[in-house]
Image: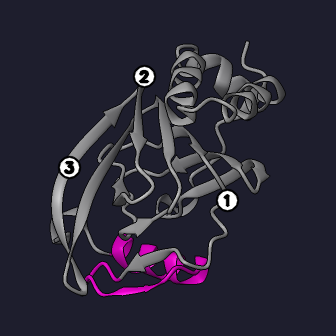
Amino acid sequence: MFDLSRFAQTCKDALRSPNAAIAVHQIVHDAIADPMSIAAALGQGQAHCDTKAQYIFLHQSPDLTIMQAITPRQFRSPPHNHLVWAVIGMYEGCERNTFYRRDGTRLREDSVRDVTAPEVIALAPDAIHGIANPLDRASYALHVYGGTLANPARSIWNPFTFEEEPFQLATMSQFEDAMNRQSPRDAA
């Protein structure tokens, strides 16, 4: 049975490892092997209005953030970075990760990878990505970060112009709203 306190402590203990991200990857992999247990422990939430993602912070400290991400059907987020390593474990549904690379002051799409439950993906601290849920139902994931997401050096990219801006939650929400008002066929 998934126990959030035990999961968080195991992740904290893994931070002492010289390969913390690899250790956490295995911890997340083991946790998502029992998706019903995670759903029972965390609840499935509700992806309201079919456009708003829910990011539920389960643990926050300067060296570790654990979050449940619930993305509604056909959801899309703008490109952003974390500036810390990340391990994402899908326990229900799918998360499409579009990776970008810098091209001068803008971004260029580099690759796309679908992470389908039960699957885990690790992101390097310098990764820039946007996420989407290509399914017609909500998707659920555990996100574990090797630090805090409250980093003023983080960036977000305008999803229409691909120009870089300082990361702010209000900006992220505005971009998500604008992107998700478009039909999936209109997406660039």
Kindly identify the residue that appears in the image at 44 percent across and 65 percent down: 81
In the rendered image, the quadrant that contains the N terminus is top right
The magenta-colored residue range is 158-181
Q: Which residue is mark 3?
A: 112
Residue 115: x and y, percent? 33, 36
Residue furthest to the front: 18
Q: Which residue is mark 2?
A: 118
Instruction: Classify mark 3: helix, strand or loop.
Output: strand
Marks 1/2 in contact by CB < 8 Å: the verdict is no
Q: Amino acid at mark 3?
A: Val
- Of labels 3 and 2, earlier in sequence is 3
Residue 130 lies, in percent from the top left, at: 35, 61
Residue 174 percent across, percent down from the top left: 49, 82
The scheme the figure's colours follow is one colour
Give the residue drawn at x 24%, y 63%: 100
- Answer few, some or many: residues within 10 Å of disc 2's Cα (few below 14, many 20 plus, some between 14 and 19): some
**Distance Cα–Cα, label 1 vs label 2:** 25 Å
Q: Comparing marks 1 and 2, which lies closer to the viewer?
A: 1
Residue receiving disc 1: 148
